[in-house]
Image: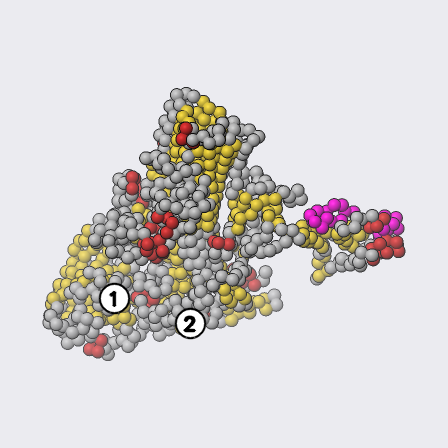
Amino acid sequence: PPPPPHTNIEDHRVTIGYGRKVLLTTSATVHSIEILNGGKLVIADTNRAILLRTKHILIGNKGELHIGSPDCPYKGNLTISLFGSDEEHSYFGRKYIGVGTGGTLEIHGKKKLSWTFLNKTLQPGESNQNNYLFQRSWGSRGIIIHAIDPKTGEVLHDDRFDTYRSKDESRRLAKYVDGVEAGLILAMVVNDEGSNNLEDSAKKSLFRLGSPSDILFLTLNNITFRPQASISIDMLSNSSILELADQPEGWGPGDRVVVASTDYSMHQAEEFTLLPCPTCTSNQVKVQGKAQFTHMGEEVDGVDMRAEVGLLSRNILLRGEMEPGCYGNEACKFFDFDTFGGHLKRGFRAVHISGLELQHMGQQTMGHYPVHFHMNGDVDARGGYDPPTAVSGLSIHHSFSRCVTIHSSNGLLVKDVVGYDTLGHCYFTEDGPEERNTFDHCLGLMVRAGTLLPSDRDSKMCRDITDGAYPGYVANPRQDCSATSTFWIANPNNNLINCAAAGSEETGFWFIFHHVPTGPSEGLYSPGHTEHTPMGQFTNNRAHSNYRAGMILDNGVKTTQANDKDKRPFLSLIGARYGPHQDADPFKPRVPALIHHFVAYKNQDHGAWLRGGDVWLDDCQFADNGIGLTLASGGTFPDDDGSRQQVKNSLFVGESENRGMPLPDNRIWGPGGSDLTGRTLPRGIDFPIRGMQIYDGPINMQNCTFRKYTALDGRHTSAFGFRLNNSWQSCPNNNVTDIIFDHVPITSRVFFGEPGPWFNKMQMDGDKTTIFHDIDGSVSEYPGAFLVKEDNWLLRHPDCIDVPDWKAAICSGHYAQVIYVQTRNPANLNMHIVKDEYPDRPLTLEGALGKKKHYQQFQPVITLAKGYTVHWDQAAPAEVTIWLINFNKNDWINVGLCYPQGTTFTVISDIHNRLTKQTRKTGVFTWTSQRDKIQHSHLARGYYYWEEDTGLLFLKVKAHNDREQFSFCSAKGCERVKITAIIPKGSPPSNCMAQAYPRHSEMPVVDVPMPRKIPNVRPVGKGIKWEGHPTFFSLGGGGASPNFLPPWWLKRVIALFK
């Protein structure tokens, strides 16, 4: 029982132990409850609401707390309210339910549908509507009447009167109309014919109401249609009807729901309270109030954009009691409200929780979260748990630190959980060793920044919180912090199925890597293990209304403390590379990370940014994102050589019919689409929206559709684009096939960039070397062609076709990704590379690395079997290493490198194994006085020719080993030529172009003929009119086989006749 008035709460410390069993049947307020040594507390399931207030509940060894059971869920209404701010426990802290080692916690509330989708769009301010359909059918001739209650929209009674057949029906109609109660709505439809025996008495009764109209019987092209009419009744009440995709099992009047945003801002999520609705269908609920924002309830342009609807209420509530304002901790610098909620922490014998609502839980202190599995190891059958540990059907809302935290625990099932309005990562895996956990049908939305970790913090927190940083360090928020995510996954071997990340300040799903496990998990795996661990199941997930991205697979966290060499705080964001292999062993075969049916829309920056070896996407949808998808390579060359990324059977939509709505504080609203109508925009009025952003590669795209990408004056929207301000390499093995364009002007298919807003000066190395292979011509209409930047004369030849709208040229040729030139002593120089066929068109590269590095690397894409010269803006480097990247066996180029007079050389060839990090010498280049002799080089012995009057060192660079299809290098390793030079001190810049040309100029030669353009086709009557090359394909007898045309082209032809 509750303590008497004025009783000191300190006197009510409850201990249940030594086999004692207690049944709580009424409300109570106590200081604390401790259950241990065989003690058991059971909450009685009564028809009276129970409120249990306490500072904490501690379930110790062999202690048990039971609220309902899996077979008999708790049916009453129970609230456990945690209060106070003192009495800190050394392990559990304050204001908690703690389950210690050997403790048991079983909570099972009513089974309720946790969340579903809208099945009809909810418009702002939309009134309550009921719709009724009158449909013609034989045997229902005459006048059909519905009498409708204007307050509820309910049909009170209806009837049909066949006034064509009988005057009796006419008299019955008059009597019926005269007897209708005043104030009701009378809806009438004439089906077929009703005037033949309609008497004056009935006409007078009807004319007092108004003049009904006949439904006409329509025919079109001799095809008969069944006419229908509908009536919609608007009720002027402060309520709305939500049409749901599923029957709302367990939902009832008074319950609270949240409807997610379906625009860019997560703050358009709205809460509602359910009202009684006797007239609702099985998939409808009535809610108090009107929507302020549009919430989509339908598929838009082929993309499922239905708003999630989450149930917040449960019949068992665990809550923290809050003070009216923030007090007494560092969080008050950033929040004006109390952030010291309750928390639930486990180190248990058995825990199963279902049907529980958690409100005002979590604290802005480490380790205190609404639901926290802490250092539990294997909690499924592998750990001896039967049944396996699980939490399901939870609602965690208005939380002050995360939703569900899994810390060094494996095999946990988290299912049907709603996480709403929380600080810091919502679904959080902590140290890196967490594996085999499953998030199934979990929803998270309105995820805000918190203070705990650098990755939780926003820009202000990142700058202001200096704990853990080296003295004097100034944070870079966008690099060190700013990663708040709905799902924060620190180990790829976890499963995410049917989950939704419906609004975060930064990212929906973020796969992050700990090079070594951190915190108390230190030592649980070897360095680099998670970077090679295969991904668990990632299927049927969705992300929208996030700022940075719907999904990121990239980056790691800093696993060392700050020091004078690396001043960033512990667990700041750093770079990492993901390359999954069997058994997480890089010496074993690759295992692709499979992403199936991922939907990403209305994310301001990216739908998804995925960096990793062998990341494969299938049946995905991207719409209304600033950038739909970017795939970044699996490793900084030459690490994780041979990986590739691919996208198949996926849909990209640039600007859908989900236009959003203008708001007073909406800073990004402007024209869009082909009709220039107003809409919300992802980043800015002039931001270049892109569907597939090509970065480095290699990537492969197959059977993908791009819809509604239309460039405007001042906005370079395109289906295919390239990473802006890119210093990195581009791969000619990037390739596309079976690409379909729907409502995409040919001018908006591709854009390579031009100087201006967002693109800056287009002077970085990657900006100049972009390329991809159009295998079947579905982009360029030239099968087998390559698309290159229009001013890259290392790749062009005389027959290339300029496409000014794309800032591109369509070319043919044999290309290698890079002659990967590494330089040392000095490293801060620029390189000029010239193709002998175009000596007046040098390509200047600044290097992919910063100028302060101890070495530099240049990564031009080149045409094979050609001659080049290389020059520098300073004295030539003392060490140059040329890596043969994407060279097949016997591929070659001739290269002349500029050096000052008086330079002496040592030139060797070697082969580098990326896995063992070992380098083996394979040959020596010796000087020859005959330039032609360099063509006779072989593996063990090569030749170089030093032309001192021009300052050019000539040699032939040739691959001697076979290369696997997607590898950068040969199967034996990366073949290299290394030049070590002794350069006279005080030498001027090594630019020999004036001496080299026209002496070494060559006539441009087209080695690979340009493919023939695929003919354009348009329907003429019942036939086809060919434009272009009429002999390329014919229908009917004779002529070339249709197989000469790619599948995407045939699909377009078929679509013309639909």
Q: Is residue 61 visible?
A: yes
Q: Residue drawn 17% across and 69% down? A: 876
Describe residue 166's horizontal placement relative to residue 802 as left or right. right
Q: Is residue 149 magenta-colored?
A: yes
Label placed on residue 893: 1
Nearer-the-camera pick, 19 or 485 = 19
**Residue 531: image location, x then y, percent:** 31, 47
The first of marks 1 and 2 along the sequence is 2
Disc 2 residue type (three-letter): Val
487 to 829, vertically: above or below: above
The percent position of residue 536, horizontal first and vertical second, equals 39, 43
As helix, strand or loop, the secondary structure at mark 1 comes to: strand
Q: Residues within 10 Å of mark 1 (few under 14, many from 20)?
A: many
The residue carrying pointer 2 sits among few (fewer than 14), some (14 to 19) or many (20 or more) residues within 10 Å by Cα, namely: some
812 up-or-down from 129: above or below:
below
Q: Position of residue 404 (x, y in %)?
A: 41, 41
Q: Please tell me which residue is depicted at 40% across the width and 73% down the height of the picture.
A: 802
Horizontal arrangement in the rendering, residue 1036 relative to residue 94 (left or right) = right
